[in-house]
């Protein structure tokens, strides 16, 4: 099991946890082997965010995007990524991380609970021990 702490700004963090946002755009991806299971722990960042870990979801796939999709695929992707056509165009090339099965934590968890003092700029691996602490907060 691979656990990743992912910094996500509002309103995207809320949209991931509601299931509306199914693709998260990032400039790189974790090192994965075939069959790896990945849990993304969502750290809500930004001036309007809670600045804490608020939930989790699964990363089920990723796609390298060098060019804009076209036709119906473009419309579907923009809807599922909750981004504008202009935002997507300016962010390319990038990876689209497929996310599923969101779960909101009952209460936001400060980074200090898992021994961190700063959030990742984009994402970072966390240990099984850190993930276990967060899992216990779900119960």
Image (cartoon, rainbow, N blue to C red):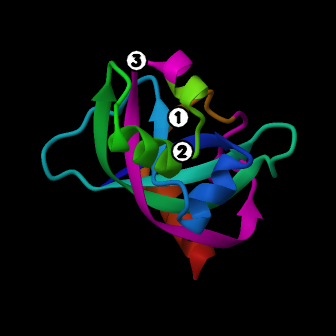
> Which residue is outermost to the right?
47
Give me the residue at 27% from left, 56% from top.
37
Q: Earlier in the sequence, mark 3 or mark 1?
A: 3
Would you identify the image quadrant in which residue 104 lies? bottom right
Nearest the camera: 126 or 19? 19
Q: Could you tell me which secondary element the residue under label 2 belongs to?
A: strand
Residue 67 within the segment the image draws in magenta: no
Would you identify the image quadrant in which residue 27 lies? top left
Q: Earlier in the sequence, mark 2 or mark 3?
A: 2
User: Bounds of the magenta span?
Assistant: 89-118
Nearest the camera: 10 or 103? 10
Quadrant of the rendering where the N terminus is positioned? bottom left
**Decide: marks 2, 1 in contact (CB < 8 A)?**
yes
Give me the residue at 87% from left, 38% from top.
47
- Left or right: 116 with respect to 133? right
Q: Return the x and y of residue 82 as percentages of the image width and height.
A: 58, 46
> Which residue is outermost to the front?
71
Work out how far the residue at label 2 is from the one at label 1, CA to CA, in angstroms.
Answer: 5 Å
Q: Return the x and y of residue 106 as percentages of the image width and height.
A: 70, 76
Work out how far the residue at label 3 is from the one at label 1, CA to CA, in angstroms.
Answer: 18 Å
Within 10 Å of the Cα at label 3, are there few (<14), some (14-19), or many (20+) other Cα atoms? some
State the residue position of label 2: 5
Residue 104 within the segment the image draws in magenta: yes
Q: Return the x and y of residue 81 as percentages of the image width and height.
A: 50, 45
- Left or right: 127 with respect to 122? left
Of tags 3 and 1, the one toward the viewer is: 3
What label sits on residue 123 in the rendered view? Answer: 1
State the residue position of label 3: 93
Q: Is residue 126 above or below residue 121?
A: below
Q: Could you tell me which secondary element the residue under label 1 belongs to?
A: strand
- Left or right: 112 with respect to 124? right
């Amino acid at each position: 099991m691979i656990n990743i702490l992912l910094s996500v700004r509002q309103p995207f963090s809320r949209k991931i946890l509601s299931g509306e946002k199914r693709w998260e755009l990032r400039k790189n991806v974790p090192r994965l082997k075939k069959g790896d299971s990945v849990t993304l722990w969502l750290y809500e960042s930004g001036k309007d965010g809670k600045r804490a870990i608020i939930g989790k979801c699964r990363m089920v796939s990723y796609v390298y995007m060098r060019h804009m999709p076209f036709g119906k695929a473009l419309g579907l992707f923009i809807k599922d990524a909750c981004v504008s056509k202009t935002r997507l165009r300016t962010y390319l090339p990038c990876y689209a991380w497929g996310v599923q099965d969101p779960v909101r934590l009952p209460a936001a968890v400060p980074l200090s609970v898992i021994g961190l003092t700063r959030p990742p700029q984009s994402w970072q691996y966390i240990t099984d021990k850190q993930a276990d602490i967060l899992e216990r907060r779900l119960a």
